[in-house]
Image (cartoon, helix red, strand yellow):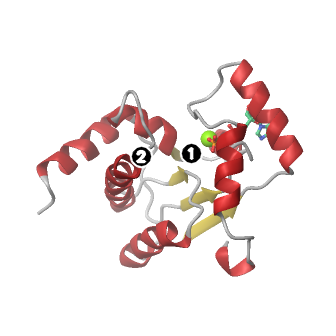
Amino acid sequence: MEHPQLVSDVQQLMESLGQLPEPLAEPAFIAVSGLPGTGKSYFCSRLAQRLSFIILESDALRKVLFPSPGYSSPESSLLFRAVHLLIEELLKRGVPLILDATNLSERYREHLYRIADQLNVKLILVRVDAPPEVVRQRLKARQENSEGKSDADWAVYQTMKSSVPPGRPSDV
Ligand SMILES: Nc1ncnc2c1ncn2[C@@H]1O[C@H](COP(=O)(O)OP(=O)(O)OP(=O)(O)O)[C@@H](O)[C@H]1O
Ligand SMILES: [Mg+2]
């Protein structure tokens, strides 16, 4: 039995999604991965215009549970425990979805592999990347236009980039 707070968090996230797409016998499970500003949310919204997916944007879901987010590790742990349960619940109902989160470490992605294995659903991982100069300009423009749900800026990009080991194909 899950902790009552976790159950209520998942419920709250579910309610924030609004109308769900039509359930399918074999729902797609896509996850993007990449540094801030590389274009993950842009890619997800373009894809969802063509195919009916629900987008689980971690930055938006974080603000449902934590209206003034602090981006601490305990906050992220609580968020992602709820997000993983939400993913399971949606896929069990046959709802095709895209997880829009940085998903940079294999340790985080292992939760996604486990869910896909347990539910026998195919997981498609999409690594999104862009040259640093393009990212810098995009983040500057995004900040100036107060666009999107992410609070990450160039400083966050640089910190995260230095904490990620240089990409190996097996990491992707
Ligand atoms: N292919 C693209 N062509 C033009 N503009 C793009 C493209 N990809 C992203 N952008 C723009 O660049 C900015 C950063 O992209 P986006 O918000 O999708 O990044 P992100 O990877 O989701 O970042 P975060 O991890 O902070 O959420 C946005 O303003 C977006 O509109
Ligand atoms: Mg984003």
Ligand 2 - quadrant of the structure image: top right
Question: In the rendered view, would you say 114 is above or below 2?
Answer: below
Q: Count neighbours of disc 2 (C-alpha within 10 A) and say few if under 14, some if 14 to 19, many if 20 or more.
A: few
| Three-letter code, disc 1 | Ser
Q: In the rendered image, which quarter contains the N terminus?
A: bottom left
| Three-letter code, disc 2 | Ser
Residue 66: x and y in percent read: 35, 34
- Identify the secondary structure beneath mark 1: loop
Q: Nearer the viewer, mark 1 or mark 2?
A: 2
Query: Is 152 or 63 nearer to us in this picture?
Result: 152
Residue 49: x and y in percent read: 66, 39
Which label belongs to residue 52? 1
Residue appearing at x 45%, y 57% in the figure:
24
- Give whichever of discs 1 and 2 has the lower sequence position: 1
Residue appearing at x 75%, y 34% in the figure:
139
Q: Quadrant of residue 161?
A: bottom right
Relative placement, left or right, of 106 versus 172 is left
Residue 25: x and y in percent read: 43, 64
Report which residue position mark 2 lands on: 72
Relative placement, left or right, of 4 versus 81 is left
Is residue 19 at least partly visible in the picture?
no
Q: In the rendered image, which quarter contains the C terminus?
A: bottom right
Query: Is 163 or 23 nearer to us in this picture?
Result: 163
Query: Is 170 or 137 nearer to us in this picture?
Result: 137
Question: In the rendered view, would you say 164 is above or below 55?
Answer: below
Which label belongs to residue 88? none
In the rendered image, the residue lying farthest to the top is 145
Is residue 60 at least partly visible in the picture?
yes
Relative placement, left or right, of 15 versus 155 is left
Residue appearing at x 84%, y 48% in the figure:
132
